[in-house]
Each structure stands twice: as structure tokens, then as C-alpha cells.
Amino acid sequence: MVSDTESRYPDWETVYADNAIWVYRMIVKRVGNVPDAEDLTAEVFLAALRPLRTTATVAQVRGYLRVTTRTVLAAHWRQTKGCEITSIDDVPDLPQEAEHGVDNATAQQVHRVLAALPDNYRRILELRFLQGCSVKESASQMGVSVANAKLLQHRALRLASALNENDER
């Protein structure tokens, strides 16, 4: 992630790579389902593509993307809920038991893969993807550094992917 607020992005690929994850997380936290969040994230970047200058500073780009995200979410809620919500900060967080539309076979496969992982790998994946914690929150709960949490997540995802592929054969 580019951190210097006075620096600039070299191209659109870098803008997307540096910002897509936080935009997606902001949206999925608000809409509560992955397919809509993926579509809305793409909509944010498509909406920003023409008016946003890559010569803008990193801070300006992030600010513009945040405002664009708010606009896209407002339009989504207007269409789906029939009401206008203008502040994403005022929207309550989703309950833990929110429906995610996962079928029983998929849920069982996830549980099998998680059960086969070492404890620390399973814990980081549960915190990050099932409980929706940030890397920082996950690191704090596990008593490790943020860098270590990122490494654990990376290794856990690689092992989970390998276990899932072996399970499907």
C-alpha cells in the first residue's frame, strides 16, 4: 500500500491494486453479501475512472474513492431498499448471524478445510474472514504483530487452498 500522502500513483493499475481491498471491505461491511459487494466495488472504480486524475496525490485519490463509494452505496440503497442513506458511518454494522447465502455442502467443505489447518492458521482465517476482523484486530487478538498476522494469513490461505484442491480430487 502506498503510504506517502504527497506521492502520486504511476498508473491506474496501481490505483486499483492499492485501494480495491479497502473499498471492497467498506462495501461488504455495509451491504452484507459478497456478490453485491464485488459488483459495487467494480462500479466505484468505473465511476472514478474518467473524472479522477492519476496526477492527484495518494491522499486525494483515496478521498475521492471514499466519496465515490458513498455515492455508489447511496444509489444501491435507493434502488434496493427504497430509501436514501447518505452517511456510511451512520449505518449500523451487520449482525454476526447475517445470511451469507452459503449452501450446506460449501459450509461443510469450509469446516473440513479449517479443521485440517494448524490452530494458528485456522484462527487467523476465522478472525479475518468469518468474523470480519481487520489484520490489526486479528493480530491483537492473537497476540502477534501485524506483519506476523499477514504472514500467517498468507500461509494459511495457501495451505487451505492446497487442502481444498486435494479434497476435491
Image (tube, grey):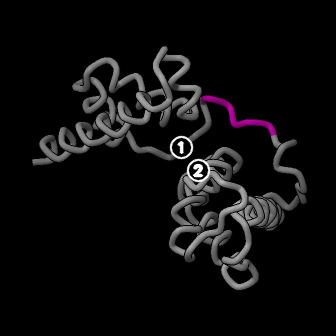
The span shown in magenta is: 92-96
Look at 67% across and 53% down and name the residue there: 27
From what the image shows, is residue 80 above or below residue 113? below
The quadrant where residue 159 appears = top left
Q: Which element type, helix, strand or loop, lies under badge 2?
A: loop
From what the image shows, is residue 156 above or below residue 4? above
Does label 1 or label 2 sit earlier along the sequence? 2
- Distance (Cα) linking label 1 and label 2: 6 Å
The quadrant where residue 63 appears = bottom right
The secondary structure that most of the magenta stretch takes on is loop
Does residue 86 appear in the picture of this structure? yes
Look at 29% across and 36% down and name the residue there: 155
The quadrant where residue 74 appears = bottom right
Would you say 19 lies left or right of 146 here? right
Q: Residue furthest top?
A: 143
Amino acid at the residue labelled 1: His
Would you say 74 lies left or right of 133 here? right
Mark number for residue 119?
none
Mark number for residue 100?
1
Look at 44% across and 44% down and name the residue there: 102
Q: Name the residue under label 2.
A: 33
137 or 41: nearer the eye?
A: 137
Amino acid at the residue labelled 2: Asn
The image position of residue 148, as x and y in percent, is 41, 28
From what the image shows, is residue 26 above or below residue 154? below
Mark 1 in CB contact with mark 2 (< 8 angstroms): yes
* CA neighbours of label 2 inside 10 A, class few (<14), some (14 to 19), many (20+): some
The image position of residue 94, as x and y in percent, is 69, 37
